[in-house]
Image (cartoon, grey):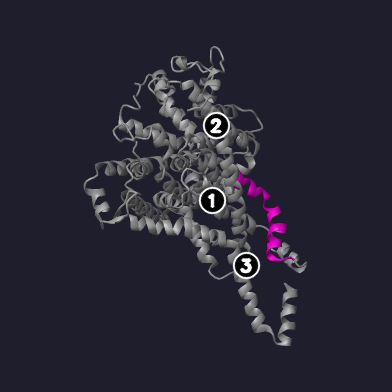
Amino acid sequence: MSTPTIKENLRADIGITPVSKRRRAIKENLTGYAFISPFIIGFLAFTLIPIIASLYLSFTNYNLFAAPQWIGLDNYIKMFTSDPRLLQSLKVTLIYVLAGVPLRLAFALLIAVILNTTSRAVGLYRSLFYLPSLIGGSVAVAIMWRNVFGDLGIVNILLDLLGLPIVKWFGNPTAALWMLIFLSVWQFGSSMLIFLAGLKGIPRSYYEAASVDGANGFQQFFKITLPMLSPVILFNTVMQTIAAFMTFVPAFIISKGTGGPLDGTLLYSLYLFIQGFEFFNMGYASAMAWIMLIIVGILTVIIFTTSKYWVHYESEGGK
Amino acid sequence: MTSKLKSPRWWIYHILVGGFAILMLYPVIWLVMSSFKPSDTIFITAKSLIPETWIWTNFVDGWQGIGGNSFGVFIKNTAILVVITLIGQVISSAFIAFGFARLEFKGKAIWFGIMMLTLMLPHDVLMVPQYIIFSKLGWLNSIKPLAIPAYFGHPFFIFLLVQFIRTIPRELDEAAIIDGCGTFKIFSKIILPLIKPSLATAAIFSFYWTWESLLGPVLYLNSPTKYTVSMALNMFLSNETVSNWGAMFAMSVVTLIPVFVIFFLFQRHVVEGISTSGLKG
């Protein structure tokens, strides 16, 4: 720190400060931009230009082969007035997100609290519970899930053992959707790891003080654990909601690309894919993408605005 | 707190938690075991986990692949894509992260904000226009649309690396400046060696995401000679009418093996990566 100051003083004495200072500032800016330039170029080429193109295309009729035809708001009007499959896919996706994300996070939190002990086996359990998250997005697991929930699959064997009626998971749209939701909940491991890291950050002394004051486990959970963890829960909720909205692979594989039975697993991304790349209605698919962007935006804003009622930030002002 | 004493509580805890872990992983174990059973008995004997006789024919059948391309071809294709993507994502992200974490320039906060926003952007919005752009560029049916964007940084990895670089004391940079190092030398000689653990984390996740991805390959690769393992499995599923479940299960297991192996070798990096940056696994 001291050397540059001496240098600067020296330069000031000779009287070259303004120019070289400005030069140095320009050089610093250039170096900075040189380092982040891959990001800027990539952002312009693969994100910004496509987004603008997508907005434009959403007002057109375009099939990739003929030039786009401007049709104004027709795509958007059609979506909500004469496309029952779209409304079905919105409904299915909302159920998938609103049931799947809270269940997944609740599981993640429950298991994280249970694993937050000093036991030596915790490392092993942590890895085992994380494994489904690791492989959950793969085609192999979707194929596995399809067969586990088959008519003769192990889920029905288990239901039978428990004396419960077996379910034809592919015979009814609601059951098929729940099969997807279970697959999402099954992958609670990555959120669990984030929660575990958060739990490690809560000072032990808080719990000790609460114990001294006679607070039981439940009170400690609701008065200490939950508030202290709330920023992490917020972050997780936002990221998981967005990811859930874009779920594609399980629906694509489990329904063999159709979204069936009776459009019960027609998640929004899958329907967008079908419109864009099976029917080549690229204008319509772009309009669908914009509606998704708006819905995700609204959900994110709702999560953030309500967060001030349930997220507890430490007064130190850190993140 | 009393875990040293193997009290009844200790036993109950481990029976419950361990039991739940086994229950959760049972489908995976079942998949692996079923791949050693004859196709026609997989569902008849689904109740018993262990095969009566262990057979390898499913693996032999599955390895024959589809349409004259052996499964080895799909593995090779995927491995090439993984390596090219991984190198691009890790190097470019490190470079960009250094700029954000260490250099001062006008508009830095704005660009960083934009990068964080792209983290949250649903990629479905980009799917159609990117496809159009890549098709106009004549990149269809090649790995270019999948590999080239990897060389412009990946927001998750940039974020992860920025967080890590910020923990490195700036005194090291300053000492290097006094020794006459330029900015690029500080990056390559000082920072890069120190962020190896985070680079490893990024590399591992890059591997997982590319290895498992389906949507990109389905969009951009048409000829079966270029298929990735995910697409090959999808093809097995489309041909499921022939009910050769054994082969499909066997190849599913094959695609999971590298994922498991890398996880057990580099567990610490994976767990830390997720815990510190919220990387989705």
| Label 3 close to label 2 by CB (< 8 Å) | no
Cα distance in 3D space between marks 3 and 2: 43 Å
Q: Chain of mark 2?
A: B
Question: Marks 1 and 2: which is nearer the front?
Answer: 1
Q: Residue furthest top?
A: B52
Left or right of A35? Residue B127 is left
Q: Is disc 3 on the same chain as disc 1?
A: no
**Dot 1 amino acid type:** Ile
Name which residue lies at 42% across and 47% down: A241
Disc on the earlier residue, 1 or 2: 1
Cα distance in 3D space between marks 1 and 3: 24 Å
Q: Is residue B50 above or below residue B9?
A: above
Viewer can see residue B36? yes
Across and down, in percent, residue B14 comes to 57, 29
Tag of residue B148: 1
**Dot 2 amino acid type:** Thr
Task: Please name the residue that numbered disc 3 is placed on.
Answer: A31
Magenta stretch in the rendered image: B181-203
Specify the principal SS of the magenta part. helix
**Dot 3 amino acid type:** Thr
| Label 1 close to label 2 by CB (< 8 Å) | no
Q: Is residue A249 above or below residue B26?
A: below
Say which of A319 and A310 sits in front: A319
Check disc 3 and report its element: helix, strand or loop: helix
Left or right of A179? Residue A26 is right
Name which residue lies at 64% across and 39% down: B266
Viewer can see residue A216? no
Label 2 Cα crowd, 10 Å radius (few <14 / some 14-19 / many 20+): many
| Label 1 close to label 3 by CB (< 8 Å) | no
Q: Chain of mark 3?
A: A
Tag of residue B255: 2
Across and down, in percent, residue B75 comes to 56, 34
